[in-house]
Image (cartoon, rainbow, N blue to C red):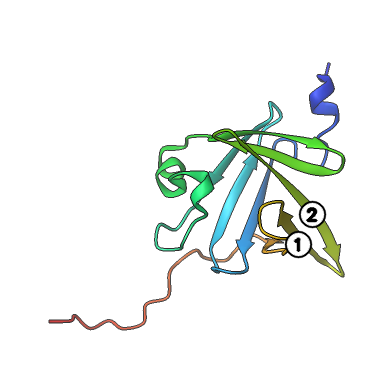
Amino acid sequence: MLSERAKTLPTVEAAFTWVRNNVTGGIVKMQWSAAGRLLVMNVDPHTPQPSEFGDLARNSYLGNSTTDYSIKNGKILTSFGNQTFETAVYKLGDRYLAARSNEFGYANYEIIATPDNLSTDVKSAGVSR
């Protein structure tokens, strides 16, 4: 029997979502558990991260889930520390964009297909002296 909480989370329950930050270009994999835990993975430590989330790269490497999540009034609610963030997801054509409540209404995130690779582009193979 599903809990009442699980019944309200059909779109992300026990799923993986790849998300790109359209400001920094950073791509992360988010795991949404049926128990309401969110794990952010595949974090590139060279890409700037929002400070509200703590050390995403370290937590990703260690497999630490840093927050719970829930769905309320059609928005994803997450909490980091003592701050709650709402994320609204919008469909624009065949794209899904997401706007966090603390980013002044900008939809800075996009749900993307599984990337072919997660490598960082190498600008030069030379060694500086």
**Is 112 placed above or below 127 here?**
above
- Looking at the image, residue 127 sits to the left or right of residue 111; the answer is left
- Looking at the image, residue 23 sits to the left or right of residue 109; the answer is left
- Between 48 and 41, the one lying in front of the other is 48
Label 1, secondary structure: give it. strand
Q: Give the quarter of the image for residue 22.
A: bottom right
Label 2, secondary structure: give it. strand
Give the image location of residue 60, x and y in percent: 46, 44
* Mark toward the start of the polypeptide (1 vs 2): 2
Tag 1 near tag 2, CB within 8 Å: yes
Please tell me which residue is depicted at 52% across the width and 65% down the height of the picture. 117
Task: Say few, some or many: other residues with alpha carbon within 10 Å of mark 2 (under 14 / 14 to 19 / 20 or more).
Answer: some
Please tell me which residue is depicted at 45% across the width and 63% down the height of the picture. 47
Q: Which mark is residue 1?
A: none
Dot 1 corresponds to which residue? 97
Spatial CA span between label 1 and label 2 = 6 Å
- Looking at the image, residue 23 sits to the left or right of residue 73; the answer is left
Locate the N terminus by quadrant: top right
Q: Give the quarter of the image for residue 24.
A: bottom right
Task: Say few, some or many: other residues with alpha carbon within 10 Å of mark 1 (under 14 / 14 to 19 / 20 or more).
Answer: many
Residue extending farthest to the top is 1
Give the image location of residue 11, x and y in percent: 81, 42
Locate the C terminus by quadrant: bottom left
The three-letter amino acid code for the residue at tag 2 is Val
Dot 2 corresponds to which residue? 89
- Between 112 and 68, the one lying in front of the other is 68
The three-letter amino acid code for the residue at tag 1 is Leu
